[in-house]
Amino acid sequence: MARILLITHISPPAVDGGSRVIHKVGEYLERSGHEVASLSSDASSTDDFSHPYSKVPKLQSSKALYFRLPVYTIFHRPLKLLSRLLPIFNVFAKGPVFKIIPFLKFLTFYLRFKPDYIIAGPLPTTIALYANFLKFLSKTLTFHSTKVLINSSFHPTDKDFHNPLLIQALKSFDFLWTLTDYETNYFHQHFGIPLSKMINVGNGVDSSLLTKAPKLHSSKAPKLIFLGSFASHKGIETIIDAFIVLTKDLKFKSSKELTLTLAGQPTLYSSFIESKIKKLPQKVRSRINVVYKFKTKDLKFLLDQSSVLISASSQESFGIVLLEAMARGVPVIGSDIPATSELIRRSGAGLTFKTGDPVDLVKKIIFLNISKDLKLYSSKGRSYASNHTWDRIGESLWQKISSS
């Protein structure tokens, strides 16, 4: 059995897609008998890296040894200003920057632990740099060969992901866990990373979501749901604009079934979304339900009450919420960015619309609501998700890295 260190910027019960996937694989490896430890901040989101925050509560259910370190927040503003002159410093402004004394205490454990593998991510945080540093320490101080698997959750259109320090780190790692063909080819073509280093297995879904789902029936009006963080790139405004149009449609305006649920992790951008909703007419506002920080057990209920999931992101590395909706047999509509388009095309579970275009989104929602293929979209999604459980993803990753 191997010794494995997980490194993420936050860790459960904090909610974040990029960190959650690392810990899901860690849970699989722990169940498989491997010795697993974890390093992360004690924050609940990346927003906490810029101001004083409350520590995330400890996770009691795992046997893995968790190191949750406090981070410096006082350096965020000066590093942000410095990065305007020297963009390379932006990765440090993103954080986390672990406090020195707790990090040194962790290092004493690390040098004794001597991990065989580090599984780290995502970008554009400092996590890739910490993983690179720890790999260097293993080689120089303990003469132990530690291999690194990175899940970058890469956003090609975001300049922060193209930081030279991060790209250099990517090139130095032993394995890259990629999520789509698009991401794999992008790394190879733009950064010259050998295809042999990349393991394209995508992301997974909890098996608990694959239990029997209620039968999907055609409804008089669509019951829409958005799942994810309330970040600016998630396109929530586009979804709201499309919903406003739907409330004016004669086919739907009198139906109580026409609803929009916005569920996920609040961010610093949440206030802008809340302000937009407050300005809407009461008859529209009353149809919108905002759910912050719902529990994992509530995810199934939220999806089962919906007829279509909308992902309107302008940037996405995979779109794990799409896979979760598929697991419950809920058809999906996603923006036509590369990662989302590839996932919807492969699964056959829904449609895409022009990114940022609420008019086109309305057309796709109406088409899906009256489509004779609604049940086909549902069954294809369920079938696709059943082949992408976390156990299958974890097994595929382990087979690849342990045999190299």
Image: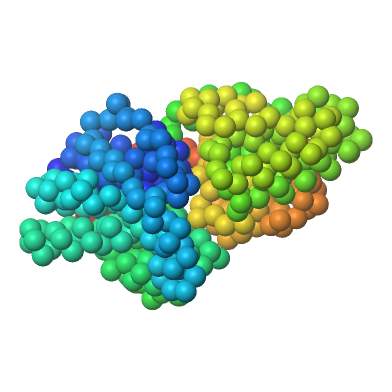
Residue 117 lies, in percent from the top left, at 21, 52
**Residue 76 seen by the camera:** yes
**Residue in the image at 71% along x and 56% along y:** 356
Residue 21 lies, in percent from the top left, at 40, 44
Give the left or right position of residue 276, taking residue 25 as reference.
right
Scheme of colours in the image:
rainbow
**Residue in the image at 88% along x and 38% along y:** 248
**The quadrant where residue 342 appears:** bottom right
Q: Say how many tags the image has.
A: 0
Give the quarter of the figure containing the C terminus.
bottom left
Give the left or right position of residue 78, taking residue 60 as reference.
right
Identify the residue at the far right of this view.
Answer: 250
Give the left or right position of residue 39, taking residue 288 as reference.
left
Q: Nearer the viewer, residue 343 or 11?
A: 11
Residue 221 lies, in percent from the top left, at 79, 31
Give the quarter of the figure containing the N terminus.
top left
In the image, residue 166 above or below residue 94? below
**Residue in the image at 77% along x and 51% along y:** 358
**Residue 4 seen by the camera:** no
